[in-house]
Image (cartoon, rainbow, N blue to C red):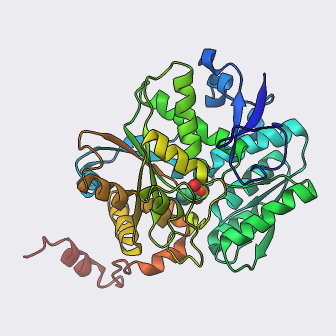
Amino acid sequence: MERILVSTISGREYPFEQVEEFSEDGESLEVRLAGLETAKIRPGLRLWERFADFLPFRRMDADLSLGEGNTPLLPAGDRLRACAGDVNLLLKNETQNPTWSFKDRGSLTCMFLARELGEDTVATISTGNMGHSVAAYAARAGLRAVVFLPSFAPAEKISAMAMHGAEILKVDAPDYAQMKNAILGLAGRLGLRIVSGNGPIRVEGYKLTAFEMFEQMNGQVPDYIAVPTSACGHIRGLFKGYRELHTAGLIDRLPRMIVVQVRNNSPLVTAIKQGLSRVVPFTHVHTVAEAITSGNPAGGEEILDKARRYDWLAEDVTEEEILEAQREFARAGFFLEPSTATLLPAVRKLVGAGRINPASTVVLMLTGAGLKDLGALQHQPPGRVLDTDIDRVEADLCRLLRPSGS
Ligand SMILES: *Cc1c(COP(=O)(O)O)cnc(C)c1O
């Protein structure tokens, strides 16, 4: 199997096994595998077995899996459809992964590689979800995990990684992008594989989500896929999956991606809307959506390039819109992180502006679960809790159940 890394911008080639995840100019790298034109879907119990022709790993041991994937793709239902505008709205619920975010799919492929190369440590930089996921998968694989965190990472996620036994370094820095670049620079110097949210190996795991949706939709392709975007790994993995299905002749068109960011931190959306080819850096970001705070994502130029070439959409949303959408999702049965809640107002605005045709099928990628960031709920109105006691409970209940207005 011939496998290399190539720069997504210049096309320069790099060794597959190298520890650096970006080119020396900061371009994102991706795996290129020979023979995709004739790749076939194989029989197999697991997704990565059925799509083995599309994957660059020489070993894919089932004992490294925590049972990620196989997440439901559901119709959004009337309430959320009414919020989004009248499109065929589907929800891909990635919060049902082992550590309650889509990050698990990429952590699995990182472990495939670590096992293949005989590495004993995996390191990562994270606002929380990736650190949690890598910590869990490293524990499963019997490897040491090192997690670099920014000072604003939520306590729930830190406790979780600590429980899995990760070494945690909370790094004080003026902003997250600066911290990330400094730590990534350590990788080459120390020969330590520090996986970021946008590394080529992680992206191979996110590709599997596209394959899974291809199966769930019986080979159909959605018109749009909306993705809350930060480091950019998820959106490019999803799109790479569809591109490779196209190369293999299994689909005849590509979905259009919708890049969603928060207004206070929209380095990609701002650039796409203004037709720029460089990311517009944001510093000192304040947002309730702490999982999407890369203010200057490494390799982000690839996304701008793809947005231009493939006619992607981009939208940003305000803090108020995020909190309102988090309540709307919850009232429809889905308890999500604020970063995920961004999707609903973004799609609503694009439908309202006539950028999305009402007959379209739009998939929202539900990236992370609400319980992972309880701190964010301090911005929500307090829940309705009635304090009562055993003597008054019946009367209180009767009052509660009485039809309103009577
Ligand atoms: C990581 C993350 C994102 C952003 O994904 P990227 O691959 O960094 O673009 C979105 N939502 C949640 C919940 C996340 O954990």
Image quadrant assignment for residue 44: top right
Q: Nearer the viewer, residue 176 or 334?
A: 176
On the question of residue 100 being in view, the answer is: no
Q: Is residue 374 above or below residue 142?
A: below
Rendered view: 45 above or below 82: above
Task: Give the x, y percent position of residue 108.
Answer: 71, 43
Q: Is residue 25 left or right of residue 15?
A: left
Q: Is residue 196 above or below residue 48?
A: below
Residue 355, horizontal then vertical, whole percent: 29, 49
Q: How many marks?
A: 0
Q: Is residue 140 visible?
A: yes
Q: Residue at x 60, y 65 (%)?
A: 294
Q: Classify the position of the C terminus by image quarter.
A: bottom left
> Which residue lies at the image location 79% right of the left edge and 60% below the top edge?
184
Residue lying at 85% horizontally and 48% vertically, measured from the top left: 142
The picture places residue 251, in percent across and down from the top left corner, at 46, 23
Q: Is residue 265 left or right of residue 151?
A: left
Image-based side of 372 in relation to 316, left or right: right
Name the spot of residue 254 as percent of width and height, x first: 45, 32
* Quadrant of image for the N terminus: top right
User: Residue placed at 57% from the left, 44% from the top?
Assistant: 236
Ligand 1 occupies quarter: bottom right
Q: Nearer the viewer, residue 26 or 144?
A: 26
Q: For this view, does 57 lie left or right of residue 308?
A: right
